[in-house]
Amino acid sequence: MSTRIAVVTGASSGIGAATARRLDAEGFHVVAVARREDRLNDLVAGLKSATAVAADVTSDESVAALAEAVGALDGTVELLVNNAGGAIGAETVEQADLGDWLWMFDVNVLGTVRVTKALLPLLERSGRATIVVLSSTAGLVVYEGGGGYTAAKHAQTAVAETLRLELNGRPIRVVEIDPGMVRTDEFALKRFEGDAQKAAAVYAGVAEPLVAEDIADCIAWTATRPHHVNIDRLVVRPLAQAAQHKVHRVL
């Protein structure tokens, strides 16, 4: 049997790294993609079958080089996990930093489009491909102080839904996964520009927020269903989070 290849963007940390490890365990040859080459090398050194490709999803040239590198591998490209993304800032719309908004749109939305567009021919060639779009519950519900991030994630959700319609009749599934509160090493810290106290406050009193491995488990589950089964959207929150604004905290 031909080697099954899975491409995971944003693989240098958090959900991306956990997903790379999980898909490696599922028998895929994992192409781990991120900007930080040193972290990628550390990651793939611990996997059974993996390739590290340093790439920036906000660069057309970098994504083109990624597609070329993936196309040169021996195997069939069956899975793309568009995980690269992130949030910066918690200002109101009135106080919006448009540079931050542009970055969030570029990495979350255009990054997904760039990588999907570049790898689509390879995915279709497999005859049984899956594209996973890692959006967020912020792509379904807005909240104060999250205008830039929720706008970007709403747009990313729209991309996933549109892509599914446009690919109907071709052997490519499109899966959208929308996590709620997930505690990782970097997400909140990056959002608050390195302010560890603000980052920790997001999860204060929450007994068991989700962790990266929980989302990796969801990604692997959707990707390993029989190919005629398409999980259109999977919303996953910790038990303590009943809704975007309803979180049980013990303080």
Image (cartoon, rainbow, N blue to C red):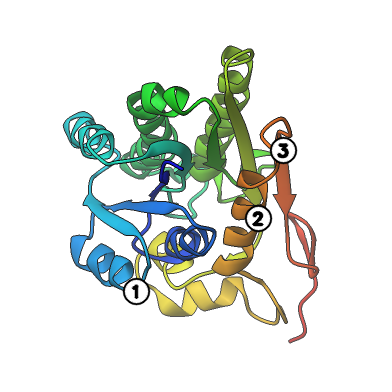
Q: Position of residue 68 (x, y in %)?
A: 21, 32
Res 128 → quadrant: top right
Q: Nearer the viewer, residue 65 or 225?
A: 225
Q: Give the labeled residue for mark 1.
A: 46
Give the residue pinned by disc 2: 218
Q: Distance of mark 2 from mark 1, alpha carbons?
A: 22 Å
| Residue 137 in view (yes/no) | no
Query: Foreground: 171 or 232?
Result: 171
Asked if the residues shown at circle 2 and circle 1 are in contact, with their CB atoms under 8 angstroms apart, the answer is no
Q: Reading the chain from its start, which is encountered first: label 1 or label 3?
A: 1
Identify residue type, mark 2.
Cys
Viewer-side residue, 74 vs 9: 74
Quadrant housing residue 2: top left
Residue receiving disc 3: 231
Q: Residue at x 61, y 45 (%)?
A: 223
Q: x and y percent of residue 33 in the render? A: 31, 51
- Closer to viewer: mark 2 or mark 1: 1
Q: Is residue 127 left or right of residue 214?
A: left
Distance between mark 2 and mark 3 Cα atoms: 10 Å
Circle 1 SS class: loop
**Residue at the spot 74% in from the left edge and 66% down from the top edge:** 238
Distance, label 1 to label 3, CA atoms, is 30 Å
Residue at the outermost front position: 1
